[in-house]
Image (cartoon, rainbow, N blue to C red):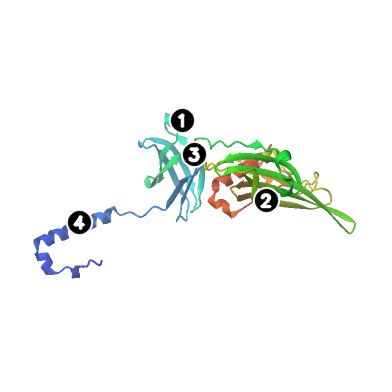
Amino acid sequence: MNCTRELISFNFIRNPLVFIVLLEFAFCGVASGQNKTTESTWQLSLDVDNYFSIRDAWSSSSKSVSIIVYDTTEKKQYALSLIKNADEWNHFNFPEDFVALSDQAKNSELPPQDFIFEVRVKRNVEKRQRLYYDPSPNALLQLDFYPFREKLDTTIVWGDLIDAYQWKDKIGDNVVVRSELIFKSLSDSLSTYKKYLYFYHFLRVDDELKLIRKFTDVFGECEETPKASFSLPSIELTDIDRDTIGEISVIYDLYCSGGDTLNYHSKLLLASNGKKFMLDATIDPCETGEEYFVEFAKSSSFRFYPYLLRFMQEKLGNYHQQ
């Protein structure tokens, strides 16, 4: 609607009732114009593993930002100061990375509750958003040994069996099996070796195993039997997103010989309900600490599951610092 002066006729203004209505409309228009604010470009989230994430989607410069966290009674509980760079996401542990402002906040035993996160730039409040915090442990899923030597049909699994585990969750009775196969080839009187690693995920239906997904990796050409192998203690069952569907993860290393000082690959495989997530780290065995990792390679699918990436990076890092 184009409200110009030319559209308001003199006859309308002469009518007192219409004139009053027009005045009321004019004042309402002025008032609404004064209260109009631009939509905030700040984006906030609190993930299932209680990582607080923040970014300014349209920012092109650095700025000092304060985060004030209130409970639902508007009492201040936590604070965080940071330098925000461009439109990149910033991630923090909540509430560990925040400063406690009250006795309640200093108590580590916080129940599940709503918190109000307020974004301030200087003294201006630019964003307020309510986020739900749940510190309760993940759903308990029990990982048990599966008696594969007695129950497993070896024709459905390639290679030599290593071990097998089972658990129950929302999708049913799960069984995972690890196996390996060494392949030797001869060319020009030179023997070379490859080693295949297999990881199977089955669902047990009516005492039969139905394959959900098979994972395979191979390493060679080595002059001796490759040292490619699973880390047996690294197998772990989690339910990070609390959906009562287990995530099973395992680490394995790939290199040719025990005395090899060259960089090698250490991989972490995580499987959940047929989905695969892989973290591939290049390792420098001559370094220690954080310098141990030369680089990470990861799947683009982690952008939909950032909490899985954080879990896998921490697990793989702890494995190499032992």
The mark closer to the camera, 2 or 4, is 2
Instruction: Find disc 4 in the rendering and name its residue.
Output: 27
- How many residues crowd mark 1 within 10 Å: few (<14), some (14–19), many (20+)? some
Q: The C terminus lies in which quarter of the figure?
A: top right
Q: State the CA–CA distance, disc 2 to disc 4.
A: 69 Å
Instruction: Tell me the residue at 37%/37% (across/down).
Output: 72
- Give the residue type at disc 1: Lys
Instruction: Find disc 1 in the rendering and name its residue.
Output: 106
Instruction: Find disc 2 in the rendering and name its residue.
Output: 215
Query: Circle 1 sits in a helix, a strand or a loop, which is it?
Result: helix
Instruction: Find disc 3 in the rendering and name its residue.
Output: 94
Where is residue 274 shown, x and y percent of the image? 60, 50
- Give the residue type at disc 3: Phe
Instruction: Tell me the residue at 33%/54% (across/down).
Output: 37
Q: State the CA–CA distance, disc 4 to disc 1.
A: 50 Å
Q: State the CA–CA distance, disc 1 to disc 3.
A: 13 Å
- Give the residue type at disc 4: Phe
Marked residue nearer the N-terminal end (4 or 1): 4
The mark closer to the camera, 3 or 2, is 2
Q: State the CA–CA distance, disc 4 to disc 3.
A: 46 Å
